[in-house]
Image (cartoon, rainbow, N blue to C red):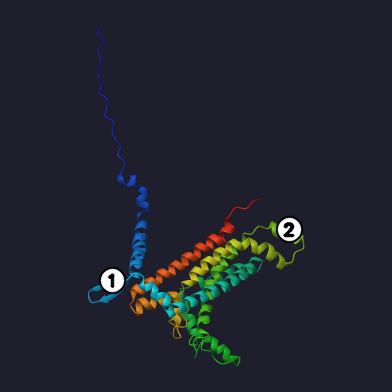
Amino acid sequence: MAVQTVDLEQPAQRTVTTPWWERNLAWLLVAPMLLMFVVFAFIPSITAVLYAFSHIKLQRGGMVRTLIGFENFERAFADPLVRQSAVTTLKWALTVTTVEILLGLGLALLLAHGVRGRAIFTSLLIIPIIMPPVAVSLMWFFMYEYTFGVFNYLLNEIGLPSVRWLSDPNTALYAMMAVDVWQATPFAFLLLYAAVLSLPRDPYEAAAIDGASRWHIFKTVTLPLLLPVLGVVVLLRVIDSARIFDKIFVMTRGGPGSSAYTATLTIYVEAFNKYDFGYASALSFLFQIVLIVFATIYVRRVMADYSAPRDV
């Protein structure tokens, strides 16, 4: 009996093609961020560096850029206004950072030790930091006003003469420092308050058993445990306070005269009042280099001691 065989054709295997967007999904997800980085960070940075080595001349129909090498940088190191603004910036950063850290630490320790109404006080303390800096500056400007300001009114009520808070070179800078301290202290307070609440209780119980005083406990237990957070707060506040611009610009425009000029305000004046964009770019470049060097040294020398693993 013959067996008939049937040759069944094998069905053709279909190749499943992955859509292009699925193959490149990772790049598509980061593309908006990369585009924003290139447009708003990379290109402006490269342009600023080119401007720093150039002389920019504005004229009808466009801008003429002439390469002049390191002439802008040589001019910056010889400019007395730049040296003055550098000293003012350093004084501002060190003063306000120190005061804000001390006030923030004091408030954090006070509220962390069972103060009644702690939630209400915490909510009130964070109000300054959420207010716009321009609105804060205008508010304090009118409070400092010589003729009808609230501070001079209080001084007159107790028999003291009025003070020209913002028009006297001896008081203007410190009056504006007080505004920055008022608004930025809640930032230090929030970080330190969270750190205080997260401290372990075992060292405090051991110190209490040994009969240690509150000052001794703070010096030997609380402060060493808070040093890593304090180091971060100091770094953030120094960098942020060194870039101060809005309060000084709104309240005195750097006056009286140029007594309150900081690095950022000097850069603004050179760029948008004198239209010397090349020189302003050189100043910006130097200012950025100083901040980067400071942050790098601080992180490697100071923060490394707290982040290094310790032997148990």
**Figure check: 294 above or below 273:** above
Q: Earlier in the sequence, mark 1 or mark 2?
A: 1
Give the tally of numbered discs.
2
Residue 53 drawn at (x, y percent): 34, 69
Quadrant showing the N terminus: top left
Within 10 Å of the Cα at label 2, are there few (<14), some (14-19), or many (20+) other Cα atoms?
few
**Figure check: 29 above or below 111:** above
Residue 13 drawn at (x, y percent): 28, 30
* Label 1–label 2 contact, CB within 8 A: no
Q: Could you give the CA–CA distance between mark 1 and mark 2, rounded to whole angstroms? A: 69 Å
Q: Considering depth in this image, is 256 or 46 the residue closer to the camera?
A: 46
Residue 138 drawn at (x, y percent): 46, 80
The amino acid at mark 2 is Ala
SS class, disc 2: helix
Q: Considering depth in this image, is 185 or 116 the residue closer to the camera?
A: 185
At x 54% / y 86%, what residue is drawn? 151
* Res. 207 in view: yes
Please identify, in this view, whether the residue under mark 1 or under mark 2 is nearer the observer.
Answer: 1
At x 70% / y 64%, what residue is drawn? 217
- Quadrant of res 191: bottom right
Residue tagged 1: 65
Q: Residue furthest top?
A: 1
At x 63% / y 70%, what residue is drawn? 106
Residue 6 drawn at (x, y percent): 25, 17
Q: Considering depth in this image, is 68 or 186 the residue closer to the camera?
A: 68
Q: Relative to 281, is 255 on the left or the right?
A: right
Q: Considering depth in this image, is 136 or 241 the residue closer to the camera?
A: 241
The amino acid at mark 1 is Arg
- Quadrant of res 10: top left
Q: Relative to 266, is 57 on the left or the right?
A: left
Residue tagged 2: 206
